[in-house]
Amino acid sequence: MSEQIQESAGEEPERIPVMQQVLDNPFLLLFLGIVFPTVLYILWGVMEIASVPVAR
Amino acid sequence: MMTTTYRTCPRTGLQFDTQAESLMRFNAVAAVLSMVMGGLTAVLVALTRWPAIKLLPADQFYQVLTLHGVNMLLFWIIFFEIAVLYFCSSTLLRCRLATPRIAWLGFALMVIGAITTNVAIFQGGSTVMFTAYVPMMAQPHFYLGLILFAVGALLGCFIFLGTLVVAKNERTYEGSIPLVTFGALTACIIAIFTIASGAIILIPTFLWSVGYIKEIDAQMYRLVFWAMGHSSQQINVAAHVSVWYAVAAIAFGAKPLSEKVSRSAFLLYILFLQLASAHHLLADPGVSSEWKVLNTSYFMYFAVLASMIHGFTVPGAIEAAQREKGYTHGLFEWLRKAPWGNPVFSGTFISLVGFGFLGGISGVVLGAEQLNLLMHNTYYVPGHFHATVVIGTTLAFMALTYFLIPALFKRELILPGVAKFQPYIFGLSMYVMTLVMMGAGTLGVSRRHWDMAFAGAPFQYEWPGAAYLMMGIAGLAGVVAVVGGVLWVLLVVGSLLFGKKLEEGEFSARPTILRMPVASSLSAHGGAVSHHVPGTMVLGSVLLVAFVLYYFVNWKYLSEVWPMA
Ligand code: HEM
Ligand SMILES: [Cu+2]
């Protein structure tokens, strides 16, 4: 019934690829996931709207 | 700190932190109740837009439509998603839930918020639709309820992140977090951006409604509102894609074709999905074409690519697992011999195919700036998003519930014979409804419009008969879909109340390492053994061909709008 996990027995410490390190870091991902839309969508958009001349 | 115990489910081997378990149950029940509200109002909306019936008068129609949008899109889905977040963190990582007290506080805020907003809409002074565009003003407690709900949901997101930290510190998993949990993390990240945007726009709007702020700029409101309004749909996408992977693992023991590829696709979601919010402003004058096109086309296509990857790897994973079991005949034996009578699977598969063919294709077409002009604010738009958020998200969540009833609620499903058909009734009628809604929209029928005939208007518009026909079919299919929804609610509530009580399983003071098939395939690592998935290749190619054809048909159609000759 119980499937034992059979890893890590005799493994030597392997080098973790950079991409995997990124994917394994939730807070870095959170940072990226907030910065991208904030800059490209919100800030850029707000700048465009703010620069529309006001009618007199 | 509250001490907790752990229950190991004897049917699945999943291990539930007792606190997390009751939180999941309460959130799921709140979700079902919201669905009841949303479903009741869905009938009224569908029957009013059915031209031959036109049930409600105009003012009630818009009030009911507000209730429908808010309860379905926000409350039903987000309550359920919080349950999914707790499941994917505490249960799949086999660890205690971080700060359960705060999780309860979050739940309480969400409940109070949801009730407050519903009361505000019922009182009648807040018939502003879920978008609540300024300068339309709702009652202050309409906004206040939404803000409380959002704060509660934000607490849930932080608890998810906190639980990841707990699991890492207490080393309850090896290597990376499981793929399903990674998908939930994606949803959580998008949710945090979503809720922050919501706060930026709803708090000032609330202050405006009580008179502290003079004016909210309508264009700014639309910009920031859609950072919330659209991104919240992307929480759904990330969440239901995770549910697809979960069901592939639960029902087939399937492993993704390549974990690396699936994770990278989720990363594309994190980076690019939310930029698509700009498609709601494609007809707005205040923002430039550069901003529109870069966000909705160039960047958004990375996210579309990610969806296509998921749409390919989920059935691919199922095909690989089935072929391994010996269903290797021809292209589609693996699919024919799939458990079509099991609503966990059938619901998921109907969700996946409908999301791709109906929601996905129409979304890309609608998101292209030029083509958008053909369909902007027509009935095409709700047609499109009922294909994403109802067929994609809602149906996937319904399917998962059939698994959660024994695993989480410890009850046997009542009336399994009815449950077998429920995903077909709900899903297929939604296929029909979304198709004809998009058809009517292509002919120009407006969304959020009480009377497409413009009775009594000085200038009349002659609709082609097909427009009325499709609106009628949409109404009919909508009613059938509601019947499918009612069946689901009855099955769920009935099972919780009257289903045979199942064995609870063992309780222990600390997490165990014992793993049984479902639990272990949900948190396993590594890709499928074989990548030989010709059936999925064919399905994927059909999707691409359908997309290309439909895309060009729309360009042709656009070219005919302003005849040159
Ligand atoms: C159960 C069957 C359902 C039916 C028959 C149904 C029917 C409809 C119809 C006909 C409209 C369009 C009204 C109009 O634009 O004039 C509508 C709008 C909408 N529906 Fe549904 N719906 C259903 C389920 C859902 C679900 C499950 C969700 C979300 C998860 C949802 C979310 C929405 C939203 C957000 C709107 C837009 C409201 C607005 O324009 O303010 N619906 N629905
Ligand atoms: Cu959108």
Image (spheres, coloured by chain):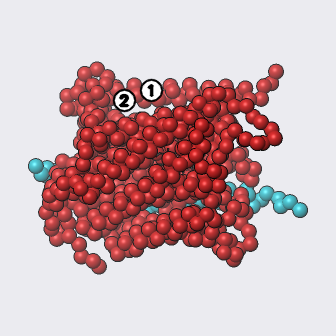
The quadrant of the rendering that contains the N terminus of chain B is bottom left
**Whether residue B523 can be seen here:** no
Q: Which residue does the image show at 51% across and 52% down from the upper left?
A: B41
Are tags 1 and 2 found on a single chain? Answer: yes
Q: Secondary structure at mark 2?
A: helix
Picture quadrant of residue B458: top right
Amino acid on which disc 1 is placed: Ser
- The total number of labels drawn is 2
Point out the residue furthest to the bottom here: B1
- State the red chain: B
Find the residue positioned furthest to the left: A1
**Residue at 27% across, 49% down:** B403
Q: Image height check: is B1 above or below B103? A: below
Q: Which residue is mark 1?
A: B541
In the drawing, what numbered circle is on residue B536? Answer: 2
Percent position of residue B101, x then y: 35, 75
Q: Quadrant of residue B24?
A: bottom left
> What letter labels the chain drawn in cyan?
A
Between B223 and B109, the residue placed more toward the observer is B109
